[in-house]
Amino acid sequence: MPVVENAAADNPEHPAALLREVMVGETSITLLGTAHISRSSAEQVASELDSKAYQAVAVELCASRYEAISNPDRLAELDLMQVVRQGKASMVMANLAMAAYQQRLGEQLGIEPGAEMRTAIRQAEKHGLAVVLIDREIGITLRRTAGNLSWWRRAVLFSGLLASLVSREQVSEEDIEHLKEGDVIETTFAEFAHDRSDLYQPLIAERDRYMAARLREAAAQHPGRPLLAVVGAGHLNGIAAHLDDSDDPSSAIRQLEALPARSRWPRLLPWLIVALVFTGFYIGFQRSPELGWQLVSDWVLINGGLSALGAVIAAAHPLTILTAFLAAPVTSLNPTIGAGMVTAAAELWLRKPRVGDFSRLRHDTTQLRGWWRNRVSRTLLVFLFSTLGSAIGTYIAGFLIYDRLNG
């Protein structure tokens, strides 16, 4: 598959340095490198599409991110209970934190994050051009990234995303332009990572291959149709290099969409803990009823107390806090249901989110206190903190039971 590159791309001083023309078979693909929070990038996208030199436009978006841009009110359709039940609460919180970080930078500059992608979509509609989505689903990227990290690194990364909400450091537009050296997702995560080597493959290299495969598919399906691809400038060289790959693009896409195999141990460990706790109770009651009830009391007070403390930290309803105390000791002995699922359900029943909470969600989560003020994000916090409290309580109570039996 022959590739022809625009010589201007080799000269960073050239006004077209962020434009690279590549021939894939009979199709001319022009790669336009942009910054995701940049006024000049949005203007350049509009200028390129107004030239009417293209018959289609590809954007660095997956289906869910495209839907978020095209339908900003989609958060009002969010089924929180389903999110919690399917174990996606942490993923939703990470997405909100990342979006809030970008939103905060955009508000400092008076430009909406992703303006260049919105411009590409609007201009495509204006000129009647087909829009091709070439990026991998953000959920798959995050899960493959998590699979590349140890549990400790995942915790540091997630806490770093939340900590970004506290920062109020002003960022100049000149600094934002430096995002052209990277990618908005990679930049957001790299901000909180000391070592980027374990992030580079899933966040950048794999997506370079993925987007190139999508473009090769588009070129094969519509040969001879000039196409403009609007991508983060950090992907420019990688995508251009992989457009010359000889493998089947569909096969490459399937490989890059595959989720990492889950280890057995994380699934078996909760059941092992349950078995050990029940064994401890049995041994305690065998020795004396007083010791047995002391162990049960320790389990209830520590597990329930820490889960309730988590609910307090999340500013949950008083009845939700009581629910956490009562539910955590029981749910910790049943790995199929977590304390957070029960407390989130209680909070949703007691404080049902209003339409305004959904509409303000993106704005409220740009500030730390906004997470507690908004009923949607606060429910997610109730889920998170009560779950963490119960998990910590399980280990503390477990060690105390072991200590009492050996005392």
Image: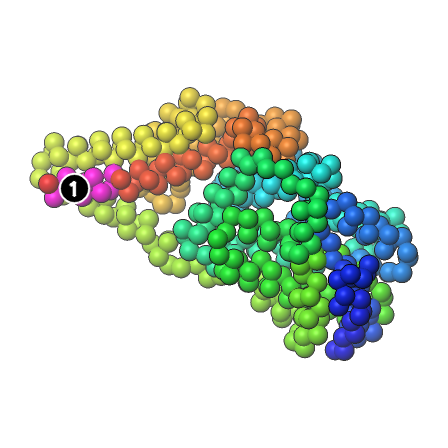
Give yes or no for residue 35 being in the magenta stretch. Answer: no
Where residue 69 sits: x, y (%)? 72, 44
Placement of 329 over or under 227, stated as above or below: above
What residue would you read off at disc 1? Answer: 403
- Residue 330 place in picture, x, y as percent: 32, 36
Q: Is residue 184 above or below residue 376?
A: below
- Dominant SS type (magenta): helix
The image's colour scheme reads rainbow
Question: Tag 1's secondary structure?
Answer: helix
> What residue lies at 88% left-to-right and 48% top-to-bottom?
126
Does 48 appear above or below 334?
below
Q: Which residues are magenta?
A: 397-406
Q: Is residue 46 left or right of residue 375?
A: right
Q: Say whether residue 350 is left or right of residue 215.
A: left
**Is any part of residue 160 visible from this angle?**
yes
Question: At 53% from the left edge and 35% from the top edge, which residue is drawn?
Answer: 166
Q: Which quadrant of the figure has residue 401?
A: top left
- Residue at 68% x, 36% y: name it: 108
Q: Amino acid at mark 1?
A: Asp
